[in-house]
Image (spheres, rainbow, N blue to C red):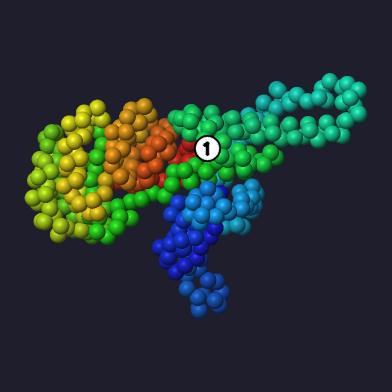
Amino acid sequence: MNIKKYQAETEEEAILQARDDLGKDAIVMNIKKIKPKGIYKLFKKTVVEVTAAVDDEKIYSHTGVRQPRKMQDNLYANSDSMKKEGIYPEEEKSAIEEKLDSLQNMLKQQMQSNMDINPPKTSKNVRTEEVVKKEGEDVEKTEDVVKNDKKTQCLNLIKEKMKDNDVTSEYVEQILGEVDKTIKADASVDNILTTIYQKIVLKLGQTKLIENNPDNVKYVFFMGPTGVGKTTSIAKIASEFKLVKKKNICLVTSDTYRIAAVEQLKTYANILNVPLEVVYNASELKEIKERLDEFDLVLIDTAGRSHKNKAQGDDLRELVDAIPKDERCEYLVLSVTTKYNDLKQIAKAYSDYEDYRLIFTKLDETSTLGNILNIKLLTNASLSYSSWGQDVPNDFGRIDTQSIAKQLLGGSN
């Protein structure tokens, strides 16, 4: 993992520097403003500092040259040295210290308890003549065994905690296998936990919202199974763009199978004072496109489809293709409470859509969020929004990848 800092006059410029240097897979870990102090504040402007990170493998694919692995202090030092390195804002406690201290204490207590009950077995327990002659060598080996045993216990406890949060065994082994190679045998619990936390954040990736779309993309399709919250999600996004961003928006629904869905969206449209168009098929959407082109943003609610129903899938494909590819984007809306095996089948049904983004709903209805990481790694689609209730326009926002990583490791919300 490579972590670097970049400074510029604006947040966008600093992020662009990071992407140019580390590649498109760089993840923004922290953003803060740095104000000049003392007499310098008269001559210097406030700058934005972005801390970004990327896997070493990602750097290789970006530059074409294998970069030397840097075992820097910011990965293995304690939390105080992390602050000095600027990984976390100095004005607040380290994110790891603040959010994961309960898990750290639990791991330490369980590891100590395990060590007291099952002390490491070494050749010193049976003192033969050969062992006596090599006592110096045995002591060194014993220390190595103890160090590795503590590290293994810590990783095993974290493994169980991730599985308790519904992360699949495949991805648990993948993540811990990658970090195990970089963690020193004598690393503290804090440092092991920090490294795994950073790895999970990198795996979750950079979230992409509607405002991240290219300028010519104004048609946004919301797809997904029935009952996951597509219509409510559209209402919340429409509220933000209409009331906060002051955009000229239009709502479109093709969910004519459910009268309640049309009425629900019509209610939201009336409250927001925005137009609502109802279309029954792809031909009707093409017919009104010229009129829709006048809006800044067009949010399109589609009928919930069963991943087992091919006919419904074909109808949705025709509807989406009614808008040119370079003018549209798609968001797949999923409930985090759906069983992972079903989510896999749903994702497979939408696999022919390129570059769709993921919205996860009903975060308030579950205590485990492993499915977010599971589906992200399965599909490699970018995460975007999440919702945790029915209140419009509240209970909705950007997916907080740091909060998810914390919860997957056993931290409280």
Element marked by disc 1: helix
Give the vertical position of 260 relative to 401 (above or below).
above
Image coordinates for residue 40, horizontal then vertical, percent: 54, 76
Residue 91 is at least partly visible in this image: no
- Residue occupying the point 52% across, 37% down: 175
Answer left or right for 25 relative to 298.
Answer: right
Q: Position of residue 276 (x, y in %)?
A: 12, 48
**Where is residue 357 drawn, in percent x and y?**
32, 45
Say above or below: 371 vs 63.
above
Tell me the crowding category of disc 1: few under 14, some 14 to 19, or many 20 or more residues within 10 angstroms, Cα based: some
Name the residue located 28 percent from the left edge and 37 percent from the top edge.
Answer: 350
Location of residue 281 by image quarter = top left
| Residue 88, above or below 259 | below
Residue at 63% x, 30% y is 153
- Label count reads 1
Q: Which residue reaches farthest front?
A: 64
Q: Is residue 269 left or right of residue 206?
A: left
Q: Quadrant of the C terminus?
A: top left
Pointer 1: what residue?
175
Residue 186: image x %, image y %?
Answer: 70, 40
Q: Is residue 330 visible?
A: yes
**Left or right of 11, for residue 86:** right
Determine the residue positioned at 67% across, 42% down: 184
Q: Amino acid at mark 1?
A: Ile
Of 277 and 221, nearer the camera is 221
